[in-house]
Amino acid sequence: MYNPKPGDRLESLDTPSMIVDLDIMEENIQKLMLLLKPLAVNIRPHLKTTKSPILAKKLMAAGAKGACVAKLSEAEVMAAEGIEDLLITCEIIGPAKVARLIELFRKHPAIQIVVDSEIGATAIDAALKESGIQEPIQVLIDLDVGLHRTGVAPELALALAQHISTLSHLKLLGIQGYEGHLQHVHGREQREKACRSSMAILTGTATLLREKGFNIQVVTTGGTGTAEFCATTPGVTEVQPGSFIFMDSDYRNAVGNYFSHSLTIISTVISKSASARRVTIDAGLKTLTTDSGFAEPKDMPDVTYTPMGDEHGWLQWKENKPDIPIGARVELIPSHIDPTVNLHDFYYAHRKGVIEEIWPVATRGRVQ
Ligand code: PLP
Ligand code: MN
């Protein structure tokens, strides 16, 4: 039976497989801590990237205070594994999800949620009242700082805060304003400038709410591309970077090499054209996502990767015929890390080619 285990060499893995270079990953974590720890912010990494409670614990051991998850169903898995200081960064809407939230909150009362509408806030309050739970749930107002994905418009934030204050089972803890549209702005100066404008909206709204008597303790924001700018904005208390731990080619093209690629997909040459400058590998759309461009063959500057449907991909050489044989193995750097991780069951974490740990992608498919 196929049963990879710690101590095996990477060569023994079947392909495609998702592998993590532990030395590089640990360096990325240390670099994040080096960058942000001296600043007056909490680091609450976003687990939408790793989808792994094991990695969440490593991040917390390195200095993170709790974690973010995108979806409620991810929080269920993380909380059951003992990661209880969790912020769910997507709105909880609809009776089925609200009912799941109540069950989760009953067991894990440290859970924090976001709201961006009166209707959403009212439904959660009503369900909590009906459940008989006495304790209020900690809520952050989700603010639109320019991404236009979710979040109440800044001019409506006060009205939402006032509405929340009328709801006995919701406790307003703070405000979230994620500037996702700025993470991949090319050029450090341009990205910083745009980020400072979004942060002005976020901290300005927090100040206004405080002036109106609301106790805004948490102001949370930021991703890999902006965390250091957010963290040096007075008034921001917490940052939420996720992708830094593994990185991807799209992020590197925008923000540079401060963090390095620690995760690659290992794939095998399964067929070779006799006449063309290409070989076919066993990694296609089911292995690597394409929303942010195609993956990049690692350490093969003259070679491009193109998916050839669900299960296959081409490696193409610009000049010369490939001197790579059938059966050779290549590594690819994903173009967008979060949805690529979600395509795989396991991480094979190695040091210098020897597998040390195997981590399940525990919240794979947890999109609810
Ligand atoms: N916070 C929120 C609300 C997000 O949606 C994301 C990513 O989409 C992040 C933080 C983490 O960002 P990144 O993976 O770019 O570091
Ligand atoms: Mn992403």
Image (tube, rainbow, N blue to C red):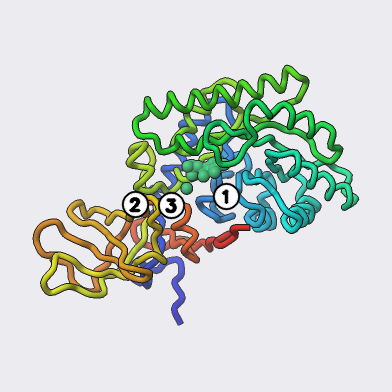
Residue indicated by mark 2? 293
Residue indicated by mark 1? 56
Residue 74 lies, in percent from the top left, at 62, 55
Q: Give SS at disc 3.
A: helix
Specify few, some or many for label 2: CA neighbours under 10 Å numbering under 14, 14-19, or 20 or more: few
Q: Residue at x 25, y 70 (%)?
A: 280
| Count of numbered circles in the view | 3
Disc 3 Cβ-to-ligand 2 distance below 8 Å: yes
Q: Is residue 317 above or below residue 175?
A: below
Distance from Cα at disc 3 to Cα at disc 1: 16 Å
Residue indicated by mark 3? 337
**Residue toward you, 25 or 158:** 158
The part of the image, by quadrant, that contains residue 188 is top left
Q: Is residue 79 above or below residue 224?
A: below
Q: Is residue 209 above or below residue 354?
A: above
Task: Select label 3 or label 1 by which is in front.
Answer: 3
Distance from Cα at disc 2 to Cα at disc 3: 12 Å
Q: Give SS at disc 1.
A: helix
Residue 196 lies, in percent from the top left, at 49, 23
Task: Select label 2 or label 1 by which is in front.
Answer: 2
Q: Residue at x 27, y 67 (%)?
A: 329
The part of the image, by quadrant, that contains residue 125 is top right
